Image: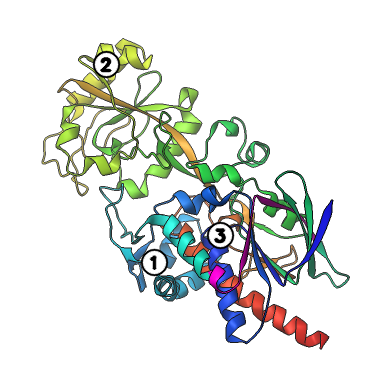
Amino acid sequence: MTRQVDFDLAIIGCGAAGTAAALAAAEKAKEQNQSLKIVILERADYEQRGGNTRWTAAYMRMENIDQPAPNFVEDMLAFSDNYADRSYIETLHKNAGSTLRWVESKGVDFDYLPTMFLTSSKPRLLPVGGGRAIIDTLSLRARALGVEIIYEATAWNLSLDEAGAINGLKVRIKGGETMELNVNAVILAAGGFQGSHEMMAQYIGRDAHKIPPVCEGGYFNKGEAIRMAMSLGAKGAGQWDAFHAEPVDPRSKREEAGVMLYPYFILVNQDGQRFTDEGYTTIDEQYEAVARKIFYECPNHIAYMIADQKMYDIPNYTEALQTEQPPILANTLEELAEKLNIPKENLTKTVSEFNKAVQPGEFLWNKKDDKKALGITPEKSNWAIPIEKGPYIAYPIISCNVFTNGGIATDTEGRVLSNDNDPIPGLYAAGEMTGLYYGKYPGGTSVLRSLVFGKRAGEHAISYISSKQKSYS
């Protein structure tokens, strides 16, 4: 059975982008004394709503709540090798502070809380309560303004009127029932495609199904919204064959179970050999590249952090170990190798050669200390200390998918662009399903851009609906 329902604006997704869009739209409609029907469609149930946002700490690349970190625009462009949309990034920079003040005014507090990065090159502002505080607060405010939220609802088809403008949306409710929504505008905010084995294989490549999402919310991001837009001729953007990677403990069931302590020790592959300079820069600027190496270069897509008892002397070391799983311990390196199924002679040789290569100098855990390990391949640039004080410690590490980079192109108002660079009337997109990132991810920008462009899309959608209604009157 199919039900037909009328809404002025439908928003697909209940994460940072979707809730920001819904609340901004509802506020704009109220400001204009318009009585509009707005709905959020969320694939998950209430307890799991919010996609990636629900589970993330939601780091923000901000010097303070009003000011983005230094070189914000320049870094984002440089990290993408200048493939990213400059106007989009400049708009993000210009509106970041005012958008966070808007979120703060709704009841979300921000602070400089401890992060998993013991060394960092850029400041990170965090919402108190993480991403969940954002969606809980913004969705509650939106509900108070009359926004409806339908859970366990998957949008699967968009339709256009004779003029090429959005006029309909088909939604499948849990159990198989279909709703046909008559709409004036749609905002797509449904995340990327890390939860789709098919799309991961299509765009990321071989063995991509072995890259798990970094949190449970990622499994709900199956890419239908991206495909719906592209079926209407939407333009793609972002690096489709790349994803934002994070090194995590595969034993853990926690979200973002990051293992970010490895710069102080060594990483080895399943053969017991080092494969990267663990300390070439601060952890916030290198963990993605290392996680990608683990997936693309290491046998069985796994690596191990090998440490000793000096790990416990590093201040705040527990912040850099977000896993709840205990370390793998052994009194000797041979015993540790056996537990890890690594050739004993290889691991002992690797550690011995590393220890001999360690240069004198002061070890400084909280900044680059230029304490090197030289004459080995690869050399180590900072934080080189001998691994010699048993019992020895290991943590397994795999690469997890935080979000996919390929997505839909929009303008700075969130309007979805066609392949001819014209907006598709009535269709908007925001958040991780929009393509922005190429190459290296500029940390602390994903949730931030979701909020900024979710808000802008919501406001512009109301202006679009208003102008459309006036043209009919």
Work out how far the residue at label 1 is from the one at label 2, CA to CA, in angstroms.
Answer: 52 Å
339 is higher (above) or lower (below) than 28: above
Q: Amino acid at mark 2?
A: Lys
Seen at 39% across and 27% down, the residue is: 303
Q: Which mark is residue 349?
A: 2
Q: Amino acid at mark 1?
A: Val
Q: Position of residue 177 (x, y in %)?
A: 78, 49
Work out how far the residue at label 3 is from the one at label 2, CA to CA, in angstroms.
Answer: 47 Å
3 vs 1, front mark? 1
Work out how far the residue at label 3 is from the one at label 1, CA to CA, in angstroms.
Answer: 19 Å
Region of the chain picked out in magenta, as a range: 142-158
- SS category of the residue bearing label 3: helix
144 in the magenta segment: yes
Q: Is 254 left or right of 308, judged from the image as shown?
A: right
The residue singled out by tag 3 in the image is 431
Precedes in sequence: disc 3 or disc 1 = 1
Q: Position of residue 275 (x, y in %)?
A: 37, 29
1 vs 2, front mark? 1
Precedes in sequence: disc 3 or disc 2 = 2
Q: Amino acid at mark 3?
A: Gly
Q: Is 264 left or right of 98, judged from the image as shown?
A: left
3 vs 2, front mark? 3
Near-viewer residue (72 or 277): 72
- SS category of the residue bearing label 2: helix
